[in-house]
Amino acid sequence: MTENKTNPLLCDPETGFCEMPSVATPGQSTSIPVDNKPVKIIYYTDPICSSCWGIEPQLRKLKLEYGAYIEIDYRMGGLLPDWSYNSGGISKPSDVAHHWHEASLHYQMPIDGAVWLEDPLDSSYPSCIAMKAAQIQDKNKAITFMRILREKLYLEKMNIAKWDNIVLCAQLAGLDTKKLKQDYDTDAKKHFQDDLQLARQLGVRGFPTLFFSDGDGNKLTVYGSKPYTSLENALLALYPEAKKKKITNNNPLALFDHYPTLSVREYAELLDIPVSQAVVILEKYTADGTLNKKVIKTGALYLKK
């Protein structure tokens, strides 16, 4: 898409990719060491990347089915430094609103693009740096934190570039907000710069980008929000011994023990059922009061009471 050259937030739903306006060519091949599990995945993302929201169903499924074999290293990409890089261009924050609506329909994930009309973000750097600060504290809570940031942005039109809103999300994720601020102002900024530097070395062109590595120099890359089989095949190519842990539908609410909030698309992906069937199940439990849901124009998010 030519418009990506002027606005990285105008992602291409067909490729599932939010492409950066300018990217350095990679230098020499960069090795990816593996630590505790057979396969490491370096996942380049950004809290405000709509295509990264679009790949959440597939990623969540990969974690449940093959979590014993993979370690995911979340790296921040800095999708939107600010709007000055495009001064004089036609792209502006309000252009993103309609695009996000289209992305929501394509990915079947709830997104309200009106934040770009009502309280537009001036950069994704604050949320990226906040993620690095959260990772310093607790890597698992950091993943929860990023999910909350995205839910607040996409469903509640919250400007997650504002510190007060970042703090609110951090509290919901159970993070120490004082330490978060200390780390945000110091080490987290360096860690974010390290992520940007590694992205240049690896030749990251946009988001989501996932590098699968077995630690023996073998590496496969998945660009964009691809179908689940693309992620599964990359893993199995590097580690054929991996055994799928099948997700069953014996208890329709069991998935909420793993993921406190689920969209219809996520629920359908995880159970490998049609979206229409997922709607029936989720609405049944909403009607009897077992589940709550947040509803916007383009979808809903279900959560256990």
Image (cartoon, rainbow, N blue to C red):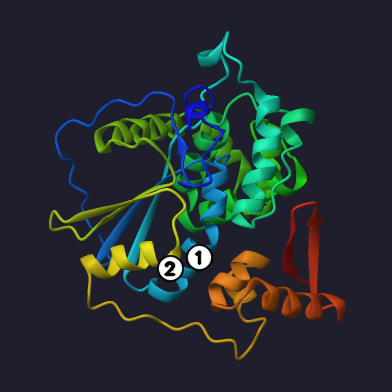
- What residue sits 62% from the left and 42% below the top? 177
Where is residue 221 drawn, in percent x and y?
29, 51
Q: Say which residue label 1 marks.
A: 60
Q: In which quarter of the image is residue 7?
A: top right
- What residue sits 73% from the left and 80% below the top? 281
Quadrant of the image for the C terminus? bottom right
Where disc 1 sits, the SS reads: helix
Give amino acid for label 1.
Answer: Arg
Q: Give left or right: position of 35 versus 259.
A: left
Q: Is residue 226 above or below residue 280?
A: above
Where is residue 195 drawn, in percent x and y?
36, 36
Q: Give left or right: position of 240 versus 84.
A: left
Q: Quadrant of residue 229?
A: bottom left
Q: In this view, does 140 lie above or below 85?
A: below
Q: Which of 89 and 68 is in front in this view?
A: 89
Where disc 2 sits, the SS reads: helix
Between the residue at mark 1 and the residue at mark 2, the CA separation in whole angstroms equals: 5 Å
Mark 1 and mark 2 residues within 8 Å of each other at the beta carbon: yes
Give amino acid for label 2.
Answer: Leu
Q: Say which residue label 2 marks.
A: 62
Q: Give left or right: position of 43 versus 145.
A: left
Q: Nearer the viewer, residue 196 or 120?
A: 120
Where is residue 37 drawn, in percent x and y?
28, 67
